[in-house]
Image (cartoon, helix red, strand yellow):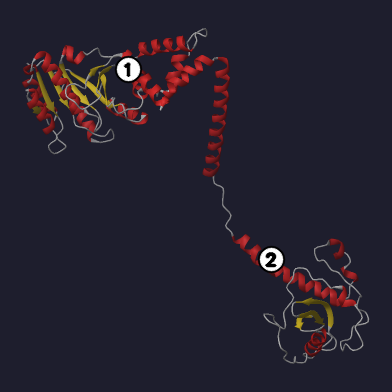
Amino acid sequence: MKIHRFFAKDMRSALAEVKDTLGVDAVILSNNKVNGGVEIVAAVDVADKPQPPKAAVPRQAMPNRSNERELSDDMVTLSSGAGRPMAKSEPVRRKAAEPQSINWDWQSREQESRSDSLPEWSRNLAKQVMDQKNDMAMPAAAAQMAEPVKKVTIADLSEEMLSLRQLLEHQLSGLRQDAKARRHPVRTMLEERLIKMGFPATLAEDVTGPMPEALGPNDGWKWVRVQLKKRLYTSDNSILRKGGVVAMMGPTGVGKTTTVAKLAAHYALKHGADEVALVSTDTYRIGAHEQLSTYGRIIGCPVKVAKDAEELEDVLYQLRNRSLVLIDTAGMGQRDLRLNQQLSTLVQSGQVPIQRYLVMAATAQQRVLEDALTRFSQVPLDGLVLTKLDETLSLGEVLGLAIQNTLPIGYLTDGQRVPEDLQVAQADDLLERALALFVGGAAA
């Protein structure tokens, strides 16, 4: 079965073109009016005509149309016009067995059940159209089959299970928090306030847990402050009161050298410059001790340098008559391998007891503070010095760290001026500062 589509300016010209191309045995499948003329779809059974059809006589083509096209529609409709009797003047004959009107929908199962009753040429036409439709669908199906199938591994399943677990824990935590807020509204409110101030959640829950139920918000906050004050230790100005050998340790950039100069200046003002001395163990940076030497000249006290434990022991022996010796250690990252060597130097100098204070910037992140404390706690610590209080937005993080590790806070610094910007740590003042930062941040 060969199917062709013809376009002409009128029906007579179109039928003549069908006859010239397909012969007198051609069957008209449909005819439609189009812009500029008519369109005829015709077919001929090749089996009935073994000889090749007569060559078509060239005719003037319609604009932007092809004189001959293969049928490619998904649905072929044999219009009623194909079954109308032709006029006597029309040269194309119809077969006697041709149906008067056939409307075929290849997507309807009801019509498929009747396909056996149609003529052979119609069944051949249906097969050709379906084959053509399948050929069009093959590239899409092949492309879909060509897509690689992602293999699900054990790692993927584990990651998915972990995500589901985290989501479930988050939802359960929210449910517990809601239930807790309904049962203990004041306690929950104060716990959330401590967390917003920067205190660790575990500490906030531990502090507010024993609070009496009868207390309101104001009395409850006073009760919480008392509990925090009991847990917050200070060194009671032991360095400036008792003297001795004191080493300032800490990460880079926290203000160790400036803190040493402030303490030395305060002690010299009270006891005289001949009672204080400075020692630098920072031999890693070029000219690292120059800043400390400048402070020493201003204060009027000697400045020594010690490279290792043996030199440090000799220097401390030379300064044995000084009532206060302050050691400025090298600023190192807590992950620096040389840190262990420096800490070992302080431990090995066992002839003279050395007080070790960790200097921490209040502006550091919670995890940075925790990591620094873990690294520098390889040697016993006697207390903390908090710096950069004038730059921080909250104090709960560093105060919570001191409370959880039962480390006393010795001194606070809130500026670069020597010796003015140095205060002795007091629990009430620290809690008042922490609350003021929280209220100021909330108002902003």
Query: Does the residue at mark 1 contact the one at mark 2 (Cβ under 8 Å)?
Result: no
Amino acid under label 2? Ala
Where's residue 184, x and y in %?
Answer: 54, 14
Q: Quadrant of residue 338?
A: top left
Location of the N terminus by quadrant is: bottom right
Disc 1 residue crowd, few under 14, some 14–19, many 20+, Cα 10 Å: some
Q: Quadrant of residue 179?
A: top right
The label shown at residue 27 is none
Amino acid under label 1? Leu
Q: Is residue 154 above or below residue 386?
A: below
User: How many angstroms separate mark 1 from mark 2 (CA)?
Assistant: 76 Å
> Mark 1 highlights which residue?
430
Q: Residue, x 19% and y 16% (percent of image)?
A: 239
Sequence order check: which comes first, mark 1 or mark 2? Answer: 2
Q: Is residue 307 left or right of residue 30?
A: left
Element assignment for label 1? helix
Where's residue 361, x and y in %?
Answer: 28, 27
Q: Is residue 348 visible?
A: no
Location of the C terminus by quadrant is: top left
Residue positioned most to the right: 96
In this view, the residue in front, 344 or 85, is 85
Q: Nearer the viewer, mark 1 or mark 2?
A: 1
> Mark 2 highlights which residue?
137
Q: Is residue 172 left or right of residue 237?
A: right
Element assignment for label 2? helix
Where's residue 118, x and y in %?
Answer: 89, 72
Q: Quadrant of residue 116?
A: bottom right
Where's residue 185, x and y in %?
Answer: 54, 16
Q: Residue, x 8% and y 20% (percent of image)?
A: 317
Q: Is residue 6 visible?
A: yes
Q: Residue, x 89% and y 77% (percent of image)?
A: 83
